[in-house]
Image (spheres, helix red, strand yellow):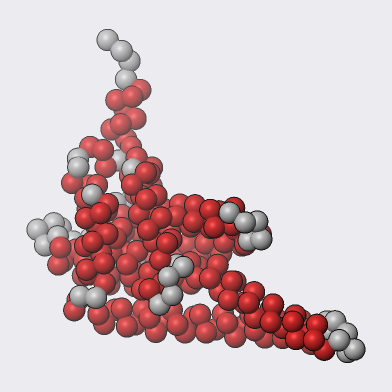
């Protein structure tokens, strides 16, 4: 199921139906990253100008500037999931409509999220992603642990938020959350794939479009499996008394 969803989402990212949305997504992602880069560089420049190590050792100041530049790149990588969250929330309905219309034409189309809920989802997604990655950044200098924390945290977060965004077009937020919990392993694996794209240069720019398309396919495939698509039926069976 997951392999089929990954293949279908990858195929659709460059399809004619999503091409215009892809270019808009790339432009918005690049613009947000540039704004973040400018803000971070100015912050570091201000810090270095007001905290000069020593006028007698200009080489140390140069080394500090080099470390600051490298730190900016690392910070940008950790901030990319938060930026992608904003982009994904903005283009969610456009991408989902194309995927549903092209790959699931016989199914009823989903409902576009109300503007208020879409904005709330996007802000919540970006805020959670920023918080999680700031925590992950604290263990950056611990070998082995840093990459593991980054992937696990983002796999969970990206899988959860992208799936609930896609499922929210067809069901109430509570039902979308129940469905995710009932299929937590599949959703986490999908989130792991999306999180892996963050570290691939250039490819990570299409991650928001791919993430939405992937979770639309996962939601549709999990829904087609029947009662296991939500936790209510399962919980009812498990809690029923023995004869």
> Relative to 238, does residue 195 appear above or below in the rendering?
below
* Number of numbered discs: 0
Which residue is most to the left? 106
> Relative to 48, does residue 216 appear above or below in the rendering?
above
| Percent coordinates x, y for residue 65 in the rendering | 72, 83
In the depicted view, which residue is nearer to us: 65 or 240? 65
> Relative to 13, does residue 137 appear above or below in the rendering?
above
| Percent coordinates x, y for residue 154 in the rendering | 48, 57
In the depicted view, which residue is nearer to us: 33 or 106? 33
| Percent coordinates x, y for residue 39 in the rendering | 62, 82
| Residue 135 falls left or right of residue 93 | right
| Residue 136 falls left or right of residue 167 | right
* Residue 168 visible in the displayed image: no
Which residue is most to the right? 56
| Residue 51 falls left or right of residue 99 | right
Report which quarter residue 6 is drawn in: bottom left
Residue drawn 35% across and 54% down?
A: 190
Report which quarter residue 35 is drawn in: bottom right
Which residue is most to the top? 243
Residue drawn 23% across and 61% down?
A: 7
Residue drawn 26% across and 67% down?
A: 10
> Relative to 114, does residue 164 appear above or below in the rendering?
above
Residue drawn 35% across and 22% down?
A: 239
* Residue 108 visible in the displayed image: yes
In the depicted view, which residue is nearer to us: 117 or 196? 196
Query: Quadrant where the C terminus lies?
Result: top left
| Percent coordinates x, y for residue 38 in the rendering | 60, 85
């Amino acid at each position: 199921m997951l392999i089929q969803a990954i293949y279908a989402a990858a195929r659709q990212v460059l399809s004619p139906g999503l091409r215009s949305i892809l270019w808009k997504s790339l432009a918005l992602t690049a613009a947000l990253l540039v704004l973040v880069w400018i803000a971070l560089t100015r912050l570091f420049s201000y810090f270095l100008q007001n905290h000069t190590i020593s006028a007698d050792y200009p080489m140390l100041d140069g080394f500090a500037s080099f470390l600051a530049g490298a730190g900016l790149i690392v910070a940008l990588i950790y901030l990319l999931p938060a930026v992608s969250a904003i982009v994904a929330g903005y283009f969610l309905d456009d991408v989902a409509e194309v995927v549903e219309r092209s790959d699931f034409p016989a199914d009823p189309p989903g409902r576009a999220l109300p503007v208020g809920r879409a904005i709330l989802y996007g802000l919540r997604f970006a805020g959670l992603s920023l918080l999680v990655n700031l925590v992950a950044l604290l263990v950056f200098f611990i070998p082995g642990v840093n990459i593991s924390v980054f992937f696990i945290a983002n796999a969970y977060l990206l899988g959860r938020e992208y799936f609930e965004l896609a499922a929210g077009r067809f069901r109430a937020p509570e039902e979308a959350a129940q469905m995710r919990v009932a299929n937590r392993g599949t959703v986490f694996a999908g989130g792991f794939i999306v999180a892996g794209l963050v570290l691939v240069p250039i490819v990570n720019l299409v991650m928001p479009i791919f993430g939405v398309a992937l979770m639309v396919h996962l939601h549709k495939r999990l829904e087609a499996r029947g009662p296991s698509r939500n936790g209510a039926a399962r919980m009812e069976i498990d809690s029923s008394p023995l004869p």
